Amino acid sequence: MTPLVYSLICTQIALGQAISLGTQEQVANHGNLALRHEKHMRTIEVPVYNRLDKQHLEIKVTVGTPPQKFSIMPDTGSPFTWVPSAASPACAPNCPLPVWNLNASSTAVDIHAVFNASYGLTPDNIMLGEFYNDTLGIGGVALPQFPVALVNVIDTIYDAQIWGIVGLGSQLQNRNVPGSVILWENLYKLGHIGKRLFSVWLNHQDAKKGTILFGGVDKSKAHGALKSTPLTSVVQTPHGDDFTEWSVNLTSLTRRVDQAGSEEPLLRTTYNAIVDTGSPNMYVPQYLYDTLAAPLNVTLRTYRNTSYVPCSLRSWSGSLHFTFAGKDGAPGPQVRVPYSEIIYPFGMPANLGEVRSEEGTALCYLGVLSNNGSGIFLLGNSFIRSAYVVYDADNLELRMAQSRWA
């Protein structure tokens, strides 16, 4: 999700589109003491569940005293953390559990700040609520007086089965909430992590879970060296340089139709691309969408504003190759994304059910969509699964390498 929380539209938003609190896992036994030290020095690792059935990610958190449990979406495109209200217009008076029971928490404090956020490529998916300070639990630690919004969930978000969000975006997006500190910043300021960064490893599409490592880097989950690409949203503040979103410069995108073939350039220009765990898909200009879909030929179908292709293409060897700007004269990251990781399994997402052509051919959802002229270039989870991504606020950069899938 981006400042208007663009990424939340995913497919499911357009249509009405988990994790146990983790303790640190052991670093792979590769004998690299420096790597082991880097991961375990004041870090918190939490599992992140790959909910293809819902077309988003989930992590487990608790809110309040005593703790109330929630499975909510980690979102690098937005700053706010929210959980649902039982009065949500999309489902009241029969909203599913869990919903936040303020009266059951002895530590909830009304800070008299309004939650007003717009989700999607257009500003009409507005959700309203109110912020409270309460204890947020994640990864085995408790964060007192953390700002959490109690939100009235609207139809598009409810239909997308998004039942809460933990924001991992920019602190500058959060400035309208008094005293608010974004999750990764809060973990750092309270001494739970040693660096203002977190690393995302989603694993491959068919995996049940990946990890988010706050405060450290686990190089055993990456193929080759992690390379830096500077953030393109850096601004000057009274406290020094900061950033407004996790966006970087995409300098090249090529396609290879088979493993031995040459690479075909696809971009007309470079783009500032937002790397966003809050979106399941990639959102690109119309010309690029048409080009990416071209190898699928007439088998491409449109169904309820979403794109479907024959499921047999999940075994196709074609791939996309992304190259990003380097830093300080060094080469930038390169990430290969197989088409098989962009095309969802048959019947996913589950709320759309099984889709077939008129001839009965099984059709699978395509995880790349047009941005409908919005100007947003967004790389969601259909890209991120193929990469190991370090979101580094201290150095104002992303570091990426090819993911080492489990």
Image: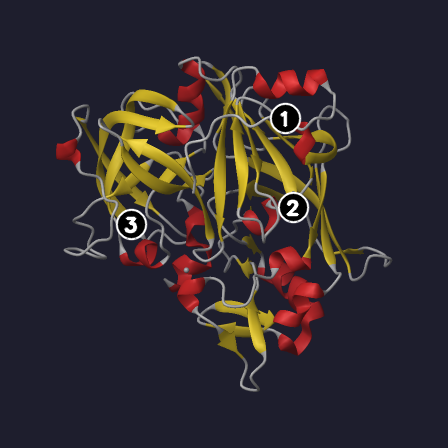
Can residue 17 be seen in this snapshot?
A: yes
At horizontal 52% and vertical 33% (from top left) the residue drawn is: 212
Image coords of residue 55 (percent x, y): 47, 55
| Between 42 and 183, the one nearer to me in the picture | 42
At horizontal 36% and vertical 62% (from top left) the residue drawn is: 16
| Between 118 and 337, the one nearer to me in the picture | 337
Looking at marks 3 and 1 on the same chain, the residue that comes earlier in the sequence is marked by: 1
Report the amino acid beneath label 1: Val
Report the amino acid beneath label 2: Ser
Q: Tell me if mark 3 has few (under 14), some (14-19) or many (20+) residues whose alpha carbon lies within 10 angstroms of its own.
A: some
Please determine whether, in this image, residue 313 is positioned above or below residue 139: below
Q: Tell me if mark 1 has few (under 14), some (14-19) or many (20+) residues whose alpha carbon lies within 10 angstroms of its own.
A: some
Please determine whether, in this image, residue 173 is positioned above or below residue 33: below
Identity of the residue furthest to the bottom in this view: 359
Report the amino acid beneath label 3: Ile
Asked whether, in this view, residue 96 is left or right of residue 374, the answer is left
Asked whether, in this view, residue 393 is left or right of residue 304, the answer is right
Q: Which of marks 2 and 3 is in front?
A: 2
Q: Nearer the viewer, mark 1 or mark 2?
A: 1
- Secondary structure under tag 1 reads loop
Q: Quadrant of the N terminus?
A: top left
At horizontal 56% and vertical 84% (from top left) the residue drawn is: 360
Q: Nearer the viewer, mark 3 or mark 1?
A: 1
Looking at marks 2 and 3 on the same chain, the residue that comes earlier in the sequence is marked by: 3
- Secondary structure under tag 3 reads strand
Circle number at residue 206: none
Residue holding disc 1: 27
At horizontal 57% and vertical 22% (from top left) the residue drawn is: 216
Circle number at residue 386: 2
Image coords of residue 149 (percent x, y): 26, 36
Residue holding disc 3: 126
